[in-house]
Amino acid sequence: MNNTLKQLAIALPLSFLSTATMANWSTTITAASDYTFNGVSQTDNDPALQASLDYAFDDGVYAGVWASNVDFGDDTDFELDAYVGRYVQLNDQVSLDYGIAYYTYQGNNSDFNYGEAYSKFGYASELGQTELNFWYSWDYFGTGAGHVITEIAHTYTLAPNHALRASFDISNSLDGDKWAWDSNQKKSYHHYRLAYQTSYAGFGIEVAAENTSLDYDYADERIVLAVSRTFNL
């Protein structure tokens, strides 16, 4: 799960759920109008049904698995990820979330499987929550290429239970001869996103507008709706 948002269990890279509010076992079910990974649709612009199962320890250590349908135009139709990490509240304002994840794709493209390390820094102030997040893979999508994603984001509370999250990230291949984003050997692209977040009757709701610098119909401007529900087990 990439970059999934912490507020909702959707990709966000894999974004992962912050364990600050988890209590032992929990599961999150999400229905989304699209599954985007750094602005690139993983479901051929179609809806996704996703689920996670997580365990959080009292010291901030957590582990879990996450699954979603995918559509790459071949026989690959299912993604299953595992991750382990630790969330640390360093002081009243600064937090750190770090760990490692492994992404697997079920079908003919099992060669796409790869591992990734991540670190996420948070800073809370009267103006909201600011994040600086990093992801590094040494074998991006099984190609042997090094790959780095850097993201800056800020969440501003409009009113109780209503927030806006703005984010900007850059995906950068460190080995352009092994992984490039188009036939012109483009090694990087940027992605920006603006999301409205709220909750109602126990459901998390997010409506996001996003776009990338890639010139593909599965990576162009779009509106994504996601509704999630977390259950403590």
Image (cartoon, grey):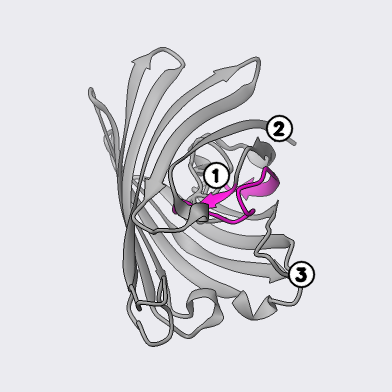
Question: In the rendered structure, does residue 107 fall within the stretch colored magenta?
Answer: no
Residue 120 visible in the current orientation: yes
Q: Horizontal placement of 163 versus 106: left or right?
A: left
Q: Nearer the viewer, residue 15 or 211?
A: 211
**Amino acid identity at mark 2:** Phe
* Residue 194 image point, x, y percent: 37, 34
Quadrant in which residue 226 is drawn: top right
Span shown in magenta: 35-58
* Residue 10 image point, x, y percent: 57, 44
Q: Earlier in the sequence, mark 3 or mark 1?
A: 1
- Whether 73 is drawn above or below 46: the answer is below
Q: List the residue tagged with mark 2.
A: 231
* Residue 233 image point, x, y percent: 75, 36
Question: In the rendered structure, does residue 44 fall within the stretch colored magenta?
Answer: yes
Q: Horizontal placement of 192 versus 2: left or right?
A: left
Q: Residue at x 55, y 80 (%)?
A: 142
Callout count: 3
Residue 14 visible in the current orientation: no
